[in-house]
Amino acid sequence: MKSKILIDKNKGGRYLKYAIRSGSQLGLMAMIIIALGACRKSGFLDQKKLSQIDENTVFTDSLNSWNYVNSRYGNISYSWEPTRWGRGGVDAASDEVQSANAPTEQQTYWAGGAVNPSNVSSEIWTTTWQQVRAINIFLKNQSRIPMTANTKKLLEGQIRFLRAWYYATMLKTYGGFPLIGNTIFSDSDAIDLPRNTYEECLNYIISECDAAASMLPVDFVAALGNPADYGRATKGSALALKARVLLYAASPLVNVSRGDDPARLVSLGNTDPNRWKLAADAAQAVINLGQYSLFRRVTPFFYNQFLNGLTAATPNSEAVFSFLPATTTQNNMIRETLANPATRGTRYQSTPSCFPLQELVDAFGMANGKAIDDPASGYPGIGNSMYLNRDPRFYATITYNGGLRFLNGKATDQPVWTYTGDIPSSPTNDASISGARTDGIYTSTGTITGYFAYKMLANNVANGGVELNRPRILIRYAEVLLNAAEAINEFSGPSPQIYSWLKDIRDRAGIAAGTDGMYGMKANMTQAEMRTFLQRERQVELALEEHRFWDVRRWKIAPQVLNQDLHGMEITRANNGSYSYRTVVIRKNVFRDNMYFFPIPQTELTKAPSMKQNPGY
Amino acid sequence: MDEKNIPLPGVSVSEEGNLRNGTVSDENGDFVITLKSANNTIRFTMVSYITLALQADAGKKMAVKMKPDTKGLDDVVIVGYSTQKRITNPGAVSSIKAAEIENIPTSSIQNTLAGRLPGFTAIQRSGQPGSDAAEFFIRGVNSINNDNQPLIIVDDIQYTYAQVAQLDPNEIETITILKDASTTAIYGVRGANGALVITTKRGMISKPSINVSTQFGINQVIQYPSYLDAYSTAVLQNEAYINDSYKLASPLTLPWTAADLKMFKEGSDPSGHPNVNWQKELLKNTSTQSNYNVDIRGGNSKVKYFTSFGYFKQNGLLRNFTPTNPDDEGVEPNYFYNRINFRSNLDITPTKTLNIRFDLNGRFETINNPNGPIDAAGLFKELISFRNLSAFSMPIVNPNGSYGYANQSWGNGYVNPISRLANSGYKRNYNNNFNVVAGANQKLDFIAQGLEAKLNVSYASNINEHRFLQRNPASLPAFYYNSANNTYTTKGNNQFPVFTQGVGNDVFNNSVNSQLSLNYDHNFGIHRIYALALVNDISTVNGGNVPINFRGISGRLGYNFRQTYGIEFDVARNGNDLFRKEQRYGLFPSISGFWNLGEEKFFKKLFPFVDLFKFRGSYGLTGSDFGYPTVLTSIAYTLPGSGTIFGNGATEGALVNTDVTWEKSRKTDVGLDINMFAGKLTMSADYFYEYRYDQLINQGAISAIIGQAVPRRNVGISDNKGFEVELNYRDKIGAVSYSIGGNLSHFKNTIIYISEAPDYPYLAQTGRQIGLTKGYQFIGFYQNSDFDTNGSVRSGVAYPLWSTIQPGDMKYADLNGDGYITAADQTFLAQPNIPTYTYGVNLGLNYKGFSLRALVQGAWGYSINVFAEGTDIFNGVPQPLHLQSWTPANADNAIFPRIGFNNNINNRTWQTISDFSLTPGSYVRLKSLELGFQLPKKWIDKTHFIQNCRFYAAGYNLFTIRDTGKFQVDPEIAQGSNAGTAYPITANYTFGLQVGF
């Protein structure tokens, strides 16, 4: 590289210096102007307002406040739902039904005796606290809702009843729980509360029921003049809940002193026969309202009471408290979706998922009202005639081999086939001939026990049949009568009043009165006979309605009925068309002594060390 | 001129003692300088050359010869918003020059970086053209919060993972990762995950040089999984039916008779008893790729330019299928990727002190996918899925030439995949990136010597669109051929559907970034002071959303005494509008320093061969707001349709945390840099510790009694520690020059606090690594001795309730000892899927015109979880592994549970996650290899216009040694149900030609 070096100390240097400086200043000026332009926007980092509805918006508006109360009904059937735990709910954890093979679901842990604080489902715990929080928010805000005191009372009555309802589910599930009153927690609170005793929780629920009952009308439609309010919680709902909770409290499970329960979380600490009296009086108070009677509006009464749309125009006099889901097709078909045989499929799911056990089938007596183990009943034993002349409630509860059900494309109801063995083929794929291929026992789409559930199913809803607005009746008057009967029998023995209630129930069921007018009942039963009779009657009348799971616990008969093999009916067809019958073991059910109550979920105990676990877990 | 007497453009020539009087040598290496002082000394400086100070004679021409600086002490390294010399840099930085990677045949830049930069972990999860970019981390995983993506800065613009993947290596000058507090604190709330900083090539003072390069190559699948043929599959299926009959009153009817098996074995009935290797039928072993680049680079003292244009195309592995309808010719279903990219980097110097920069660049990509496969996960999921494509699912074509379908009960009626691929069209994604950077750099020596102001305004946009052309693959005509009675049954309504077209806009986002900075750097004799002040604004818009705005100031102040001691302070104060006004800004300071022991006299005397021996250390605070939500200020109520007949409802929403803030990281780093033997041996080592706190995590320890979903809070704490070592040696033996280097990185993180309420101590995450899989401990198989005479599990042997257990089923540890295997027996298993040790070994050889470069890269310390189709028989297509399943005879050597068809949930790896399907992984890969030949100058001089010409052959992912346990998967595969269903990773071989004019 060859370069020329010039040395000029004066003129050139000064010129250069000037040029550099003025150029620099210009450049700098330009940059500052641009930079200022870029940074000019004031509030560059301020958050932009996006619209939002908040607590204030809701409770300063009467319509929003009504809507807020409506939302509190959203979970009332949470312990009852047949879809709870995937399929079958608690019915599948008792001796009522077998759930389809869903091995990781909760009912398997219960049926197999393996439930523990880690694997127990926590939905009752979490859902209850969610609704309680929401209810307490309402109570905090209710003074500023712009509505009349009278209307506000109707809202408060409903919402306090609902809180009692959720707590009552909590009480039967876990025993005592922390009573938090109207507290609303924030996430900075250290929430470490001990559980209150069973008795304290019981008293709280009872007093809330009483308070709600004092605010609520016996008939909401009459009180507000709006048919759309049919089905809201009423005075009767509150009193009936109180009666049920008191019946549970009087029952042998908790009306006792337990050495392994020093904190009295799951027992009352003594045995007080007077608790039966309280339960009886509470049930009598519901009856005394004169507001309810057994459903006899559409025949067959027993079957149709569950399908009767709950509206002011088509009331159900037996429904004391119901969940009325929004009328979506899915809600309307929930039972069919779970239980219809595949040949009667639904548009949601063609594989049925819960199947009645033989133990439930055998609980149904005969049409003459006698139990099948009564020699006078006329029950022929296992065989071709075993499903004939049974208690009419059997036909409204169970679909059995040969039972007639709606079949798409046929004018009349056609038999459902649950057998195995030699299945006739049908060139036209006619389910009335070859249905056992899909419905039969041991097929992958068929029954597991030889039966399908039918209770609360609309016969023709499948395959585009009529959809109904389907209430879920959570307390019905028949239960109130049975509660009253049981409490009176336990307190003072059988009475004519008990017989008359039972006759009413059996008459409505369609059982023949018989020449003695006793509907198959033995006259002059002893207290113990009546106890056994009432237990059987409850099992049949209230089957698949979330009662059996709890009843066998509170009566303390679970070790006998649940700690044993449970059965189904295998029917084998020979190629000559004749059937042979065999009861088969469906599952070995296990009941351990701790399983009277649910364990508190372990994570909840880890979070709140002051809370104690239930005995045995 | 340089040591070979070749003119050297761009040398800074300035007057000693009056450095602001200066110029640079032009494209011919010439310069003119007018000196103003009397001492007549001129200083010549140039990067990578030793600075010279020469006496000038008035009026005489001067010939200056500069010597290269081999010691590497003055090598420039990039730090946040600025540069440093290796000798005075106090921070932890690793970098490479793009020349090392530009010929590696992969489309994604980060794939080339694995093993080259210590502290950089890259894992390539897929080989699909256009979607094969590796995910990467700097110093591993630091955050519990899935917030581990480094900050990516390309020429001062912030990029995303996807955007950086598309960069053409030919445009890149340097790639740097910034790892410690001293280099990342200046990024403040965005620096905690480290930064990847890329600079692109710019013009320089030289004659225009035009470079043309072309590359053509093939991609070869590294390894297809091997599957069992129809006969073996049928035998196993029969075995499965026998096993599934355990305890049944009447055994299941076997699906295949002896006659069936015979036909499978002999292949005597290819229509009724097909035996198809679908992988072979649908896929080629190789596909092609090509790459073309033209760039022009040059400039003079007024204007400098670098412009380039590139085109890259990579084809897919599908075979070429003839569509049924001849009109469909040209409807391209095969995977492919093409990219057109351009860049124009322009520097204009209107005055001696002002430099204006104007950069334009863009990338336009097309990614094509076949539309045929029904399954959401695509063709590779079908290939591995038994229900889709087993060896006997259907014949390739029926005897009459029509396409068949899978009509067995386990085949789900899938239509022939060839028909679907040939006729179902494509889905094509278009990604368009367009960026502009305008800037100016003004020297302000008139205010203070060494001061300059810089302004940058950039706009970056990214628009993604797609188009599909499709026929419903499920309704294509298909016929089941019954070979027994020679009849055809049609499937469904046999109409050939028409194509439907769909067009959509997927993503539009853009960001505007303005930066104004003042930079100061001046030597006062043996003292050097340098400083930086910067104001930064970023506004990012995603689609039509409200923009997310970021603003901050950063500063740096440093002092060096000689080059022996140095201390530096960095600070950033920045924040964004995600956070509440009162706590929007965070302050992130750091301090760092070095002590150059090698500059001390006694040390120089003792160890004269040591050029550099520098201790450095840094400590500071950085933050991360990546993936953070906008802070809500009040609880939102919803007015949903009610679940009841009473009509509308209203309800409270989740609680909010108005105090959300960014997570913070305290980083400590100590390092040692050594250069020896005149730069032949260089070494760097770092140890780091990072304490990451205020991490926004779920509050798992709050009682459900609160009754509402609780917000995340800044309570999580984790730490991470590790080391990096790098060693390079280069030398010459005669005409052979060579270099060899290696690096090793390790990190290990620990969760210190996570809000949790574990049921059992073994379910706690505290104290464990981040990202572990939760599952059961596999402890072998149930053996016959575990069962009583009824075939039920003997008492005392733990068993699960989720299914009936029989001999040969998988057995899990009963951790809580209750006699049952339940969800409570799970724990956290093994290691995460990100390697905790990575290493690379580099080799370079030059002999005359020949050059060889190789990189071996590897990793260990991680695990791979391959479940579902990847492992489970009859969920996946049977693999050789299944031949070693449990049978009474093979009870001791079994590596797989007893075969089942409707397999026991206990043995299904996707429902019962356990360490049966989790295996430690490790691998060594010949990641890249390049062999080049530069034509001798005397050959090309005859052409008179070609300056240089080079041929080379290069490869990527050439050779792999791996340990993936029993699985046939790539060692870098993602875990989970994606494992085995991703497009296979390919080895790429290319031949290239580079010509300079």
Image (tube, helix red, strand yellow):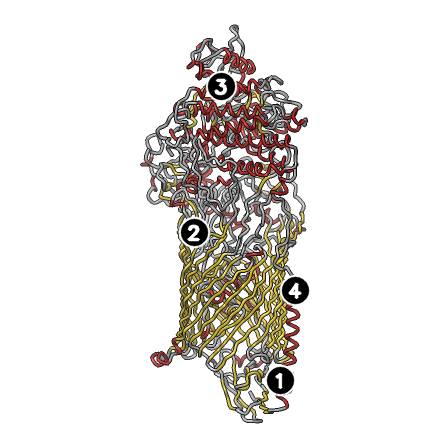
Observer able to see residue B232? no
Across and down, in percent, residue A340 comes to: 55, 27
Calculate the distance from the C-alpha at mark 4 to the C-alpha at mark 1: 34 Å
- Whether labels 3 and 2 belong to a single chain: the reply is no
Q: What residue type is disc 2 on?
A: Tyr
Q: Chain of mark 4?
A: A
Badge 2 is on which residue?
B753
Vertical arrangement, residue B892 with respect to residue B958, above or below: above
Based on the displayed image, in which of its 4 quarters is residue B858 positioned? Answer: bottom left
The reply to whether callout 1 and callout 2 are in contact (CB within 8 Å) is: no
Calculate the distance from the C-alpha at mark 1 to the C-alpha at mark 2: 62 Å
Q: Of label 1 and label 3, which has the lower sequence position? A: 1
Badge 3 is on which residue?
A280
Calculate the distance from the C-alpha at mark 4 to the C-alpha at mark 2: 43 Å
Q: What residue type is disc 3 on?
A: Ala
Vertical arrangement, residue A321 with respect to residue A58, above or below: above
Badge 4 is on which residue?
A40
Q: Residues within 10 Å of mark 4 (few under 14, many from 20)?
A: few
Viewer-proximal residue among A489 and B4: A489
At mark 2, the secondary structure is: strand
Badge 1 is on which residue?
A17
Q: What residue type is disc 4 on?
A: Arg
At mark 4, the secondary structure is: loop
The reply to whether callout 3 and callout 2 are in contact (CB within 8 Å) is: no
- Whether labels 1 and 3 belong to a single chain: the reply is yes
At mark 1, the secondary structure is: helix
Across and down, in percent, residue A368 comes to: 51, 11
